[in-house]
Image: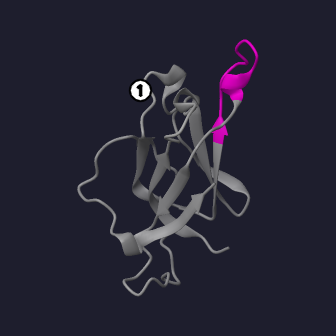
């Protein structure tokens, strides 16, 4: 698939069970098979008390064609905490035009630091690039 400038990634926790498993997460963004960005640890040791959503914002954009979500914690007891439970991932790009079609010329970008925080705006529904739900 073609690369897009990524400006935010939203991770949604399950609401039916196992909320504490939504911890010790980080993600990587790749471009042509090369990791161009690695996030910091999200909800380490469930320090954020099983959040319903984790919103991560990229400033400036990171151009990528693949996102991988990782679970990083040692096996505890029976290893149940190693299970990755997640409800949904949304990846947002400003390159998706009002018509819902992607712009054909993404801007170049370098890897940047990323932290959960409020942006100056919330993404519009038509700017969602990928929405993957399990």
Q: Which residue is rendered at x = 59% and y = 70% of the image?
A: 3
Q: Is residue 14 magenta?
A: no
Furthest residue to the top? 77
**Image quadrant where one finds the C terminus:** bottom right
Tell me residue 37's x, y (percent): 57, 48
Badge 1 element: loop
Name the foreground residue: 58 vs 51.
51
Q: In the displayed orientation, state which residue is furthest to the bottom.
A: 99
Q: Which residues are magenta?
A: 70-82
In front: 100, or 88? Answer: 88
Q: Indicate whether residue 73 is drawn in magenta.
A: yes
Which of the pair 124/38 is nearer the observer? 124
For image coordinates 59% across by 60% down, the residue present is 132
Give the x, y percent position of residue 123.
34, 64
Q: Is residue 84 left or right of residue 40?
A: right
Principal SS element in the magenta part? loop
Q: Residue under circle 1?
A: 48
User: Is there any visible trace of residue 108 in the rendered image?
Assistant: no
Left or right position of 106 against 57: right
Q: Residues within 10 Å of mark 1 (few under 14, many from 20)?
A: some
Residue at the limit of the structure toward the front, as seen here:
16
Q: Position of residue 23 (x, y in %)?
A: 55, 30
Q: Is residue 123 visible?
A: yes
How many dots with numbers?
Answer: 1
> Toward which corner of the image does residue 117 lie, by quadrant?
top left
Q: Nearer the viewer, residue 60 or 44?
A: 44
- Which residue sits at x=39%, y=75%? 126
Q: Is residue 55 above or below residue 133?
A: above
Quadrant in which the N terminus is drawn: bottom right
Q: Position of residue 50 (x, y in %)?
A: 46, 29
């Amino acid at each position: 698939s073609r690369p897009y400038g990524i400006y935010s990634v939203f991770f949604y926790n399950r609401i039916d069970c196992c909320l504490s498993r939504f911890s010790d997460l980080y993600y990587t963004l790749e471009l042509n098979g090369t990791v161009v960005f690695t996030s910091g640890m999200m909800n380490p040791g469930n320090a954020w008390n099983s959040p319903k959503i984790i919103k991560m914002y990229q400033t400036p954009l990171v151009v990528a064609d693949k996102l991988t979500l990782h679970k990083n914690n040692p096996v505890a007891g029976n290893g149940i905490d190693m299970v990755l439970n997640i409800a949904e991932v949304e990846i947002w790009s400003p390159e998706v035009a009002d018509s819902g079609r992607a712009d054909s010329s993404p801007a170049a970008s370098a890897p940047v630091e990323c932290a959960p925080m409020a942006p100056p705006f919330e993404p519009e529904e038509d700017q969602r690039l990928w929405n993957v739900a399990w």
